[in-house]
Image (spheres, rainbow, N blue to C red):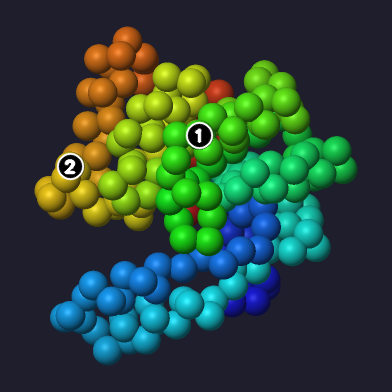
């Protein structure tokens, strides 16, 4: 998609928050194709295999335009960081005044082309973010893909981070157990966090923490 195509719907919908990756990267799930013998649709296999030659483009110029264009709509950003270099790119845009605190960093682990799901990488991302921005300037969140979802999220929460679950990131509820819904994963991580004496924010509290404009200000 062109940048204009990527911006078309957010400019129409004017959402409270939008995802924004802090760099171009090789983002792929093509090895999965070797483990699948039965495909539901004709387009699936060539699409998945074709990701071996796919680049997810986000140049500095692209990022700048997205920040300026959607910023005029009052949209804030889920700033997706797949590697430590993305934190330094974020720091550049903070220095340029295009991203203002409090901003929301979604650190992502376990996607081929980005950081692996090693606990040491989670510690590194938190440490570098603290050094670059100071803990009061940002909200930190963890996305663990596949089977690493719940373990990394639990570790991240203990480190003071927020958590993300959903079937976009993992199709499983537990080892060998497919999730039937996103809600199942939400209930599981909520139980884990509450047993660790953490309090889960309500939607209203989350909006206040992230300084979002509110549901009344969107166009959908």
**Residue drawn where x is 37% and y is 86% of the image:** 46
46 and 199: which one is in front? Answer: 46
Q: Residues within 10 Å of mark 1 (few under 14, many from 20)?
A: few
**Residue drawn where x is 16% and y is 45% of the image:** 175
In the depicted structure, whether residue 146 falls above or below residue 47:
above
73 and 114: which one is in front? Answer: 114
**Residue drawn where x is 25% and y is 15% of the image:** 195
* Percent of width and height locating residue 97: 85, 39
Query: Which numbered tag is attached to residue 152?
Result: none
Q: Residues within 10 Å of mark 2 (few under 14, many from 20)?
A: some
- The single residue placed furthest to the top in the displayed view is 197
16 and 130: which one is in front? Answer: 130
**Residues under numbered marks 1 and 2 in contact, where contact means CB atoms less than 8 Å apart:** no
Query: Which numbered tag is attached to residue 174?
Result: 2
Give the mark count: 2
* Percent of width and height locating residue 101: 72, 29
* Percent of width and height locating residue 103: 65, 34
In the rendered image, which residue does mark 1 sit on?
120
Quarter-of-image position of residue 193: top left
Task: Let me know if residue 190 appears in the view.
Answer: yes
In the depicted structure, whether residue 117 falls above or below residue 161:
below
- The single residue placed furthest to the right in the displayed view is 96
User: Which secondary structure lies at badge 2?
Assistant: strand
User: Which secondary structure lies at badge 1?
Assistant: helix
- The single residue placed furthest to the bottom in the displayed view is 42
Mark 1 or mark 2: whose residue is earlier in sequence = 1
**Residue drawn where x is 62% and y is 54% of the image:** 21
Can you tell which of label 1 and label 2 is closer to the viewer? 1
């Amino acid at each position: 998609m062109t940048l204009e195509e990527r911006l078309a719907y957010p400019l129409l919908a004017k959402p409270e928050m939008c995802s924004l990756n802090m760099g171009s990267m090789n983002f792929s799930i093509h090895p999965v194709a070797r483990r699948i013998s039965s495909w539901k649709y004709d387009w699936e296999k060539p699409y998945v295999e074709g990701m071996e030659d796919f680049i997810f483009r986000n140049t500095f110029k692209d990022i700048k335009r997205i920040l300026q264009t959607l910023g005029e709509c009052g949209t804030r950003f889920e700033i997706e960081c797949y590697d430590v270099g993305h934190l330094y790119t974020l720091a550049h845009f903070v220095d340029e005044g295009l991203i203002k605190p409090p901003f929301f960093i979604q650190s992502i682990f376990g996607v081929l082309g980005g950081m692996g799901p090693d606990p040491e990488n989670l510690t590194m991302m938190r440490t570098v973010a603290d050094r670059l921005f100071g803990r009061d300037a940002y909200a930190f969140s963890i996305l663990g893909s596949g089977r690493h979802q719940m373990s990394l999220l639990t570790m991240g929460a203990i480190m003071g981070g927020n958590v993300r679950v959903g079937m976009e990131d993992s199709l499983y509820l537990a080892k060998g157990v497919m999730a039937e819904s996103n809600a199942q994963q939400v209930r599981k991580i909520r139980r884990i966090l509450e047993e660790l004496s953490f309090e889960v924010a309500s939607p209203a509290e989350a909006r206040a923490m992230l300084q979002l404009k509110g549901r009344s200000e969107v166009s959908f």
